[in-house]
Amino acid sequence: MGKMKELQIETQNLARDWEGLVEDILSQPAVGSAVALKPDEMPATEDEYEQFRLVPDLRFQPLGLDHSVAIEIRMFRWHRDWHQRISDSIAHMHEILSSDEFDRGIIVTTVDLPDNLRTQLYSPEDRRVEVWGVEKLRELAEGNDALSSILDELLSETILDDDLRGPLKMDPELRQGRMLADKLRQTPAGLKGWRDFELLTEEAIRLLFGRDLSNINAQQRTDDGLNRMDLIGRIKTEGGSFWAMVASDFSTRYVVFDAKNSHDPITQQEIQITEKYLFARGLRTFAVVIARNGADQGASKLVETQLRENGKFILVITLAELCAMLEGADVGEAPENLLFERMDYVLMRMGR
């Protein structure tokens, strides 16, 4: 089994653990009954995808009531993520409710939501959508030691900061992730489509990470005039976030993005080109390479070598992974989750 497939399974398993726990909590005799609705396999056609995206994670029947409630579970690994993504999740839940199959919807998040923040999520005109934090799950699991223990264990594996900072700011921007993902998939591989791929990748980075990176600039040429970076952004270090963690752990202020549109997996040569953009004294030690078809074994080994010997971290993601982040962002999922899993995979398997 390939590394990418193993990583995808790890991420899916953590999400499934949350889904299973929420289902078990809601299926307690004193609470009601819940059943998972989404299939394990992703849809293969456009029509199937349209149906798939409007199916909630769970159907919940509260005890003593005759109406069904749509449940969506949002796994956040940094508290700051839900600040940024919750408005998209609420908008997506309204799409689900528009089918009239469910009376109301509940978004279950994996972070604690103090009352003063949670009240900002409700509109007096429409209270069909409710947002639950971990404190609600704890309340429902109270008295069941097994479920409470699983909840605490899952939280320890999921949440990577314990800071809830700043006021909630609802972002009215309409997400265009899926549209952008479709355009990226349609670009030809190789030289024929390299420029479109590069421009669309830039648009994707701005869409996904524009809230955490400032002064994002394209086509920067290094002082020696030899190397050209596709994109570079300054990391906003205030508050807890994936990018703030990267800045601290890798002593970097900037992140470089490189787009590679080759037909085949990239090789050591492409990694060496990206490596030239990075140097510690310039506070540039972290790069993300978007390689259409991933990296070969030699490239992956060079990534480890650069990290071990020079402290330079080059993270490679595929076009499929970029598109998954874009489509997930439309429904309020945090794109940083995938980057963290990729980074975690490299660090945990790196030899001395």
Image (cartoon, rainbow, N blue to C red):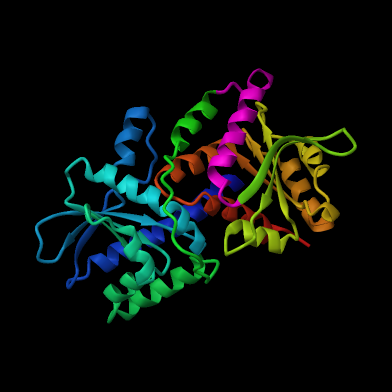
Which residue is located at x 62 percent, y 42 percent?
317
Tell me if residue 1 can be seen. Answer: no
* Total numbered badges shown on the rendered structure: 0
Rendering quarter of residue 155: bottom left
Q: Residue furthest right?
A: 224
Residue 100 is situated, as x and y percent measured from the top left of the image, at 17, 43
Which residue is located at x 64 percent, y 56 percent?
236
Establish if 146 lies above or below 238: below
Residue 99 is situated, as x and y percent measured from the top left of the image, at 20, 40
User: Does 22 appear in magenta?
Assistant: no
Q: Quick one: quadrant of the C terminus?
A: bottom right
Q: What secondary structure is the stretch in magenta mostly built from?
A: helix
The residue closer to the viewer here, 180 or 171, is 171
Q: In this view, does 63 lie to the left or right of 86?
A: left
The residue closer to the viewer here, 297 or 271, is 271
Q: Give, as a single range, the part of the protein colored magenta.
A: 187-212
Tell me if residue 46 can be seen. Answer: yes
Residue 231 is situated, as x and y percent measured from the top left of the image, at 69, 38
Which residue is located at x 20 percent, y 53 percent?
104
Establish if 63 lies above or below 214: below
Q: In this view, does 65 lie to the left or right of 283?
A: left
The residue closer to the viewer here, 147 or 259, is 259
Establish if 208 lies above or below 183: below
Residue 2 is situated, as x and y percent measured from the top left of the image, at 59, 45
Establish if 24 lies above or below 42: below
User: Does 195 appear in magenta?
Assistant: yes
